[in-house]
Amino acid sequence: MKKTLLILSITSIMLSCVSEKNTSKDVEVAKKVESLISKMTLDEKIAEMMQDTPANERLGIPYMKYGEALHGLWLVLDYYGNTTVYPQAIACGSTWEPKLVKKMASQTALEARSLGVTHCYSPNLDVISGDPRYGRVEESYGEDPYLVSRMGVAFIEGLQGTGDEQFDENHVMATAKHFIGYPENRRGINGGFSDMSERRLREVYLPPFEAAVKEAKVGSVMPGHQDFNGVPNHMNTWLLKDILRDELGFNGFIVSDNNDIARLETMHFISESRAESAILGLKAGVDMDLVIGKSVDLSSYHANVLKDTIAQNPKLMDYIDQATSRILTAKYKLGLFDTEPKEIDIETVNAGKKEHQDFSYEMAKKAMVLLKNKNNLLPLDMNNIKSLAVIGPNAHEEQPEKGTYSLLGGYSGLPPYYTSVLEGITNKTKGKVKINYAQGCPLLSNSKEGFSKAIHAANKSDAVVLVVGGSRKTGGEGVDRSSLDLYGVQNELVEAIHNTGKPIIVVLINGRPLTINYIAENIPSILETWYLGMRSGDAIADAIFGDTNPGGKLTVSFPRNIGHVPVTYLERPDFIGSGKGLYRDTDKSPLYPFGFGLSYTTFEYSVPKLKNTSIHTDGSTTISVDVTNTGEREGDEVIQMYVRDDYASVGRYLKMLKGFERVSLKPGETKTVSFKLGFDELNILNQDMKKVVEPGTFTISIGNSSEEKQLQKTKLNVK
């Protein structure tokens, strides 16, 4: 009788790993896993619940190797030669072109498979909450849930494949992270204390994960370090079971963030032992314990921790079987049981990457954002200048002795080479323009010793490219800041070069919005490039000399000072009147708003037209706008649609992005762009936290940024 009950229990666990629309393949996998579970010892099951578990030779259970894939493959502890490094996630977001992200991820999957990696801890689906002090801004696609959703789905589909190609020999398993609300911290500190309403969690942070599960069928999810409503995410049954599995329908496996099961004791002070931490994690549905480096002292899903506990309470075996079954199911889906591990041929792996490196370059050209271009200083005409100064701590970086280049951003592998701005401009000008280079100042120093050389270089040049910003040493995971000013003496360097009177182009290489008021007020041309990947300098040189027309748009708002934080276009109505709802001492608006970006050409929008000006709550319509290139250069424009329910049963944000499209237009060319308006675009969360479309009027805004003066509005009536 006990054996029969055990088999029924395992069968029910396995069926929970299969989608509602069972396929014959799913059923076959479930049966195989059920059979395998029945043969495994407790030690073998627990071993499967740790990341990077070696192959089980007795039962023929294969190895599932992990890596990071945020913007190219990064093997955290191993070195297998060079990998392609694409633009950082914040730069990918600035392309506003999901198909580019999908292609990048598909190429990353190929490189992962070639190195034996089949499970990647990417993408980062965190929506940035408007606090650039937080170092991991660069890892996100931006501050808007719809934009992050579209980019996230594209990434997952590229990495995992879709349809019959999902998890095949050319694709790997993605991990959506960090579930959920990770950037919503009170001090801009990584993993810091968070406190928010369920409404904010559902309106801002949940949509990208919902899209990842329902649309992209993501195979794995990683919780965040923090808690929600006082309950750490790694033991939060409401988040991991009620919402993620039951509400969204997630049927993959959950992997912890690094050391976070143990942190239920050591950081959150909930449990009093690692064994208690392990049981809390297992009961909530965390299937795999990620401990990078596999330290026994930090591992909670370990035989040393769990065996005695299970022996004392055999009912806990159900949780062990559940976790092991989900992990084995993933290995079967990835085809690992059907293929023999291959010996890695580094030369062959590296030889096939030129296409990927070239695509990294194409993405970089699409990601740059032109913030200012007074009197059309850019692009420079190579025929009209004889000399050009290239100055700044981020203008050049030598090959590092170990690790990777600091100007690639966090979670970067080591590419075969990195092209700096100095190298890109030197290669582009091919000796036609004399290049005068000076560092000016180190990024991490207050020394002004190099100012005189920089000023001399500027004085003997016709124009200046001044490259400032940040690096992995001033931002990224665990590098949070209390100030958003340029690090060190960079701002003073900008002032010194500005005082030479030379035409200056500032190139920002950085991973977070910075308070660049002096630059914005005094420098005629500003190019935000974020971290553009291994071909950074080539792409930037193309933009400076006009071979590329920047068409990217910001996906995060820029504050005017630290007192503006949090800064985001996602605002609710303020009490405006008698000075309330405004700052007394400064402009409340961002220095540069979400969706902003200029071009070397100009665009004109027609009045948006609704196909139907009135629809029913269960109906839909479309809205169209004509966009014309009214300038003399070919260029890209990103058309953005925002929606607001004018009067509703609950408070709403003033507007929310619900559609966007990037189009290329030749001079004089006009294209019509249309967006759907239906349930997905018009629904709100009512007082019962249910998605509904309420009758009434809706303001539909279309334009080239979230800034009110750039938007054209029309009204839709919903009955």
Image (tube, grey):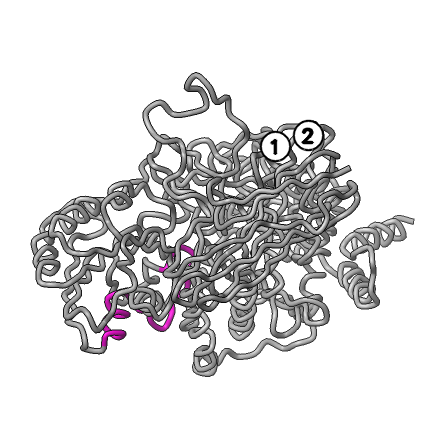
Q: Magenta stretch: residue 415 in it?
A: yes
Whether residues under marks 2 and 1 lie with C-beta atoms below 8 angstroms apart, the answer is: yes
x, y percent for residue 175: 59, 55
> Is residue 540 rendered to the left or right of residue 364?
left
Q: Of 662 and 293, which appears nearest the observer?
A: 662
x, y percent for residue 433: 18, 73
x, y percent for residue 248: 72, 46
CA–CA distance in space, label 2 to label 1: 8 Å
Residue depicted at x 64% and y 46%? 286
Could you tell me if residue 235 is visible in this image?
Answer: no
**Magenta region:** 408-429
Residue depicted at x 66% and y 72%? 168
Q: Secondary structure at mark 2?
A: loop
Q: Residue furthest top?
A: 578
Residue for badge 2 = 648
Q: Secondary structure at mark 1?
A: loop
Q: Of 137 and 109, which appears nearest the observer?
A: 137
Q: Of 5 and 510, which appears nearest the observer?
A: 510
Q: Which mark is residue 553?
A: none
Residue depicted at x 60% and y 51%? 659
Q: Amino acid at mark 2?
A: Ala
* In this view, 625 is above or below 386: above
* In this view, 313 is above or below 65: above
> Is residue 396 rendered to the left or right of residue 452?
right
Q: Magenta stretch: residue 249 in it?
A: no
> Is residue 555 rendered to the left or right of residue 373?
right
How crowded pointer 2 is (Cα within 10 Å; few <14, some 14-19, many 20+) is rated as some
Q: Amino acid at mark 1?
A: Arg
* In this view, 583 is above or below 103: above
Residue for badge 1 = 652
Q: Of 581 and 226, which appears nearest the observer?
A: 581
How crowded pointer 1 is (Cα within 10 Å; few <14, some 14-19, many 20+) is rated as some
